[in-house]
Image (cartoon, rainbow, N blue to C red):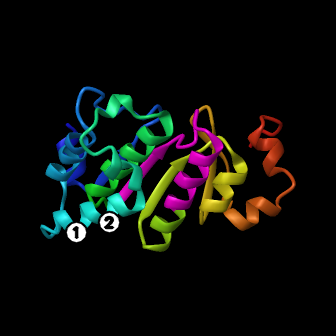
Amino acid sequence: PPETIAAAGISLVPEGRHVFAGLSVKENLGVAARLRRGSGQGNVLLDKVLAVFPILRERYNGAAGALSGGEQQQLVIARAMLTQPTLMIVDEPSLGLAPRFVELVMSTFRQLREDGQTLLIVEQSTRRALSLADRVHLLRSGRCIMQGTASDLAADPTFEAAYFGGREA
């Protein structure tokens, strides 16, 4: 169950956003806050998350289903942040987003990483993946066909071909 996963310190930012559309932004964030691990700093953490995503403060009492795709993605990331995870798993964070939202989302992940958050990100854009990662694992059909540091793979001339299906391990 989700509460068991959250209690283990794992949060998920799913592909396709998956907000609770009939609930308000406040209620969506409240669901995550109830799963939070840690010290009881709920209001401080909520203020921090709303500072990262100010549009959520503006839309706080509005229906989550009325948010744009990029705003919904911010809400889902905010929910994950509120659980104070040890590991945040992020599936296709840029999928279907306008470029301005993609940059906001990616800069948020860069900041989380700098703050010590462990992220496991599945991303179709090699450029984005390499810019965020310490380590990269390239999977095809459930098998790891390449792995290494982001800098090593960025310099490897076979990486892009492998990514686009031109190389088997």
Under tag 2, what secondary structure? helix
Query: Where does residue 125 sit, x and y in percent of width and height?
Result: 68, 45
Q: Amino acid at mark 2?
A: Lys
- In the picture shown, does residue 17 fall above or below 45? above
- In the picture shown, does residue 115 fall above or below 43? below
- Disc 1 versus disc 2: distance between alpha carbons? 6 Å
Query: Where does residue 65 sit, x and y in percent of width and height?
Result: 35, 28
Q: Does residue 11 appear in the picture of this structure? A: no
Report the front residue among 35 and 160: 35
Identify the magenta region.
Answer: 87-109
- In the picture shown, does residue 108 fall above or below 140? below
Task: Kindly check if marks 1 and 2 are in contact, taking CB atoms under 8 A apart as contact.
Answer: yes
User: Which residue occupies 83% across, 43% down?
Assistant: 161
Q: Which residue is mark 2?
A: 48
Q: Amino acid at mark 1?
A: Val
Query: Where does residue 128 sit, x and y in percent of width and height?
Result: 66, 53
Q: Left or right of 74: which side holds 2? A: left
Q: Considering the image in quadrants, where does the N terminus appear? A: top left
